[in-house]
């Protein structure tokens, strides 16, 4: 069955926007954040206008309604991700989720001389927390390189790096290359040597129905805003055994059982890690996004998006002086990072914006990856289920004209 983006595009009011320069918006920055359907916006607005209240703290009607909606959202999101054995901890996003692991699990379970395995593909949010821990505790960080020709992780080097490792952190799908890593093999190899595994699934969740429990990682981090949900919320999925090894990250209301002058006791499970007023409206909005996404065939929508990405990548590769990263294989994220020899990435982005086309520019919070390729920045066009063939054609045509004129 052919996927029709126009069926779903109408649910996104921002896609009808005319920019200040009079150009219609062509939004191709979906790897940074996706747009939100009206139902998500409306669900959050209803919370604020009809039953705005704090959760878990009172017995009045509004609080009961808010608590039911908030905890209902937790269950709906857990079900969407196939969580059958484990815990969903709400966070502000993938970055906080990884920092939570570093603080709550890392500081409690790692000591001087212990080894953490990272890859050169990691986003800064999966590098900096571990560097901070290394400075504080003295853990060793080992780096797994990737092949600069085919963009695949060096699995031979990965296996060697595992000796004595306590933790493996790996990005599921690269936000620069679009490459989907062999996550299942990585998890198996790491567990075989007794290492815990953290997967950064921020770029995978918008395009892949990840079965968290089936995947088997100890930690999985995701963000709502990359999958049609609101900003400011994400989740850390933790299996039950690993959760018992974690200490509280933040102290305050809601994560406690009892507080005395000389000590405090804590809640069990995910509640121990959610201090203070939670992200109530955001959780409700995320649940609505998941409900909306459940009406869409993920396989067909991803096939549509990757087809657009591959079409653009193939066209760009035919342009003299153009470098295009990634492979745009079927399982990859639908994105293209590209750079022209004589046209600076920022200049390209500004000229595309003048035509109404929104793309990402810069190092994409992955400076080690780009440095390994000898690059400082690229442009990145990323597609989602509401993007159309006409938009892909317009991007190709516009880039070709800009290079002809300015390079």
Image (spheres, grey):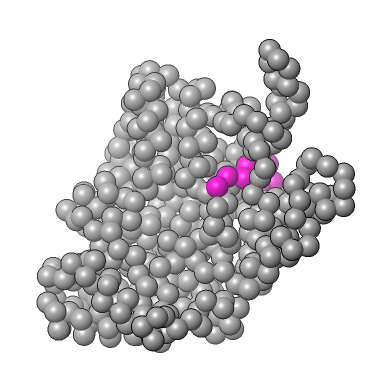
Q: Is residue 314 visible?
A: no
| Observer-nearest of 100 and 177 | 100
User: What residue is at 87 percent from the left and 48 percent from the top?
Assistant: 60
User: What residue is at 51 percent from the left and 34 percent from the top?
Assistant: 101
- State the count of labels: 0
Q: Quadrant of the C terminus?
A: bottom left
**Compared with residue 309, is residue 218 higher up or lower down, i.e. above or below?**
above
User: What residue is at 14 percent from the left and 79 percent from the top?
Assistant: 406
**Compared with residue 309, is residue 75 higher up or lower down, i.e. above or below?**
above
**Compared with residue 82, is residue 87 higher up or lower down, i.e. above or below?**
above
Residue 251 picture quarter: top right
Q: Position of residue 318 (x, y in %)?
A: 20, 78
Residue 310 picture quarter: bottom left
Q: Position of residue 91 (x, y in %)?
A: 58, 45
Q: Quadrant of the N terminus?
A: bottom right
Q: Position of residue 316 (x, y in %)?
A: 24, 76
| Observer-nearest of 199 and 101 | 101
- Direction top: furthest residue: 262
Q: Position of residue 52 (x, y in %)?
A: 75, 55
User: What residue is at 44 percent from the left and 67 percent from the top?
Assistant: 30
Q: Is residue 85 magenta?
A: yes
Left or right of 180? Residue 86 is right
Q: Which residues are magenta?
A: 82-92
Q: Is residue 93 visible?
A: yes
Q: Is residue 162 magenta?
A: no
């Amino acid at each position: 069955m052919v996927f029709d983006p126009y069926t779903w595009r109408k649910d996104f009011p921002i896609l009808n926007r005319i920019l200040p320069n009079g150009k219609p918006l062509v939004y191709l920055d979906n790897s940074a954040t996706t747009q939100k359907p009206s139902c998500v916006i409306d669900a959050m607005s209803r919370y604020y206008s009809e039953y705005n209240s704090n959760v878990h703290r009172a017995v009045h009607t509004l609080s009961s309604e808010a608590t039911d909606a908030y905890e209902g959202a937790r269950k709906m999101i857990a079900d969407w991700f196939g969580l059958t054995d484990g815990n969903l901890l709400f966070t502000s996003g993938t970055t906080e989720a990884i920092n939570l692991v570093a603080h709550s699990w890392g500081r409690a379970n790692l000591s001087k001389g212990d080894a953490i395995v990272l890859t050169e593909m990691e986003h800064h949010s999966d590098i900096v927390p571990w560097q901070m821990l290394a400075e504080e505790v003295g853990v060793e960080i080992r780096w797994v390189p990737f092949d600069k020709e085919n963009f695949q992780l060096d699995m031979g080097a990965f296996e060697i790096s595992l000796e004595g490792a306590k933790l493996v952190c790996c990005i599921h799908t690269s936000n620069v290359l679009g490459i989907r890593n062999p996550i299942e093999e990585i998890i198996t190899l790491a567990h075989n040597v007794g290492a815990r595994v953290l997967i950064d699934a921020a770029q995978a969740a918008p395009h892949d129905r990840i079965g968290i429990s089936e995947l088997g990682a100890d930690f999985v981090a995701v963000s709502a805003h990359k999958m049609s949900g609101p900003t400011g919320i994400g989740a850390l999925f933790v299996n039950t055994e690993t959760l018992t090894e974690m200490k509280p990250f933040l102290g305050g209301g809601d994560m406690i059982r009892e507080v005395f002058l000389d000590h405090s006791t804590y809640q069990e499970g995910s509640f121990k890690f959610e201090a203070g007023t939670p992200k109530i409206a955001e959780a409700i909005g995320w649940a609505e996004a998941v409900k909306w996404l459940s009406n869409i065939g993920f396989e067909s929508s991803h096939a549509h998006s990757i087809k657009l990405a591959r079409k653009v990548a193939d066209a760009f590769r035919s342009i003299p002086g153009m470098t295009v990263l990634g492979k745009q294989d079927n399982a990859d994220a639908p994105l293209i990072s590209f750079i022209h020899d004589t046209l600076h990435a920022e200049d390209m982005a500004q000229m595309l914006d003048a035509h109404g086309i929104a793309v990402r520019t810069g190092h994409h919070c992955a400076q080690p990856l780009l440095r390994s390729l000898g690059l400082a920045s690229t442009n990145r066009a990323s597609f989602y289920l509401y993007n159309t063939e006409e938009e892909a054609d317009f991007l190709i045509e516009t880039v070709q004209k800009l290079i002809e004129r300015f390079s």
